[in-house]
Amino acid sequence: MKQTIRARMVLSALLLLALSMTIDEHANAGWSEMECSIDQWITNLWGTSDTNVYAVGGRGEIFRYDGDGDNDSDPDEIWEEMTSGTSHDLFGIWGASESDVYAVGLTGTVRHYDGTGWTNIAGEVGAWPNDLHNVWGSTDSYVFIVGTAGLVFHYNGTEWVNQSIPGVSSGDLYGIWGNSASDVFAVNDSGDIVYYNGTSWGLIYSGSVPLYGVWGSSANDVFVVGENGTILHYNGITWSSMGSGVIATLYGVWGSSASDVFVVGENGTILHYNGSSWSSMESGTFEHLSGIWGSSTENVFASGDQGTILRYEPDVIPTTTTTSTSTTTVVSTTSSSVSGLERCLAEEIYGKFSEEMELLRYFRDEILSRTLEGQEFIRLYYEWSPVIVKTMEGDEEFKEKVKEIIDGILPLLREAVE
């Protein structure tokens, strides 16, 4: 009997969440999968514009997108394979220009692109046999590569120098980003954040949750992501935890500004930050996503397992207002919607300003969002919401049944919140 009650409550919570939450202005718009013959995981992306983007992945694969889909061997193929010269897995990519690009990976692999072809410069860096996970630079003569056991290799315009990081655990460094040559952040899977001031590296934050990605809009606005939906923010003075609303591991972060930040992670997770709160986006895939890069807010690329490459090009989006709780994001539509995917379904049943709607929102925000299980319900909403919306719009009888179910649950919710 208890299992039956518990199952009903879980189903009720999911249903209420699906009916009472409204999708963020970015949640339904724009993400689509791109045509590509890549059959390996695509770990990372980088580019100079929306018509010059590079993707790196397993077995040394490097692909380039030039924006016009002009591939002589396959007219439908818009990502063209480049000859990388290696079969080692590649994990990171960055460049100073179209003719100065670095790709790094397994067992000290470092490839350099001069605008004509990729060449091996692993001997110059000297990282073998250690794995290299990412690369970033401020200019063509100021480049950093990070890898296993806290290794950092720095190019000063003349040579590559192996830099040590005193006071840091032996965790593997995965993410690196800087605001300038003397303002660089890196993160590792031991939960450490290290900082380079132009002279030396030092530990500036130490936690217990593995961290994988870092990006900032300025020296006083830096985002770090990691396991269990972890998002940390630096305001130039202190680090603080942000409520992501998910428990998935987050791998990559990129933004066009302080109020337009994207995060990718496990099971197709994509989050967006609008300057005040985080909200989930519908990615259209369940593949793990690890790479994220864009040329602007209207041209963002994400990559992941099984050769997945997604592109974000937002359509016309309804105006929304957004508020946030400590653990989740609450969004309410302020314009009249045309698509059912953009409407709050419970509003259609009870009315936007009804007592029922007030109770449902309170239950969602003050009860569901306070636990990890509740946060998982929030994630599942974005997975199932399109199906529920379409079914209700096309089946009036189903809509009535949904109303009957909610009518039966409302008294229980009133008791729970009193």
Image: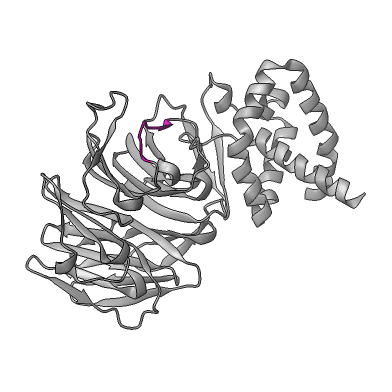
Q: State whether residue 271 appears in this view.
A: yes
As drawn, is 275 to the left or to the right of 179?
right
Residue displayed at 53% across by 46% down: 267
As drawn, is 391 to the left or to the right of 153?
right
Q: Is residue 287 above or below residue 29?
A: below
Q: Residue furthest right?
A: 1
Q: Quadrant of residue 140?
A: bottom left
Where residue 369 appears, x then y in whole percent? 64, 51
Where residue 163 appears, x then y in whole percent? 22, 76
State how the image is colored.
Answer: one colour
Between 368 and 269, the one nearer to me in the picture? 269
Between 415 and 46, the one nearer to me in the picture? 46
Q: State whether residue 132 appears in this view.
A: no
Between 352 and 202, the one nearer to me in the picture? 202
Q: Main secondary structure of the magenta part?
A: loop
As drawn, is 141 to the left or to the right of 410?
left
Q: Quadrant of residue 316?
A: top left
Where residue 237 appears, x then y in whole percent? 35, 68
Residue displayed at 42% across by 31% down: 32
Inspect the magenta stretch and tell me whether residue 49 lies in it.
no
Span shown in magenta: 30-38
Q: Is residue 400 above or below residue 214?
A: above
Q: Is residue 109 above or below residue 19?
A: below
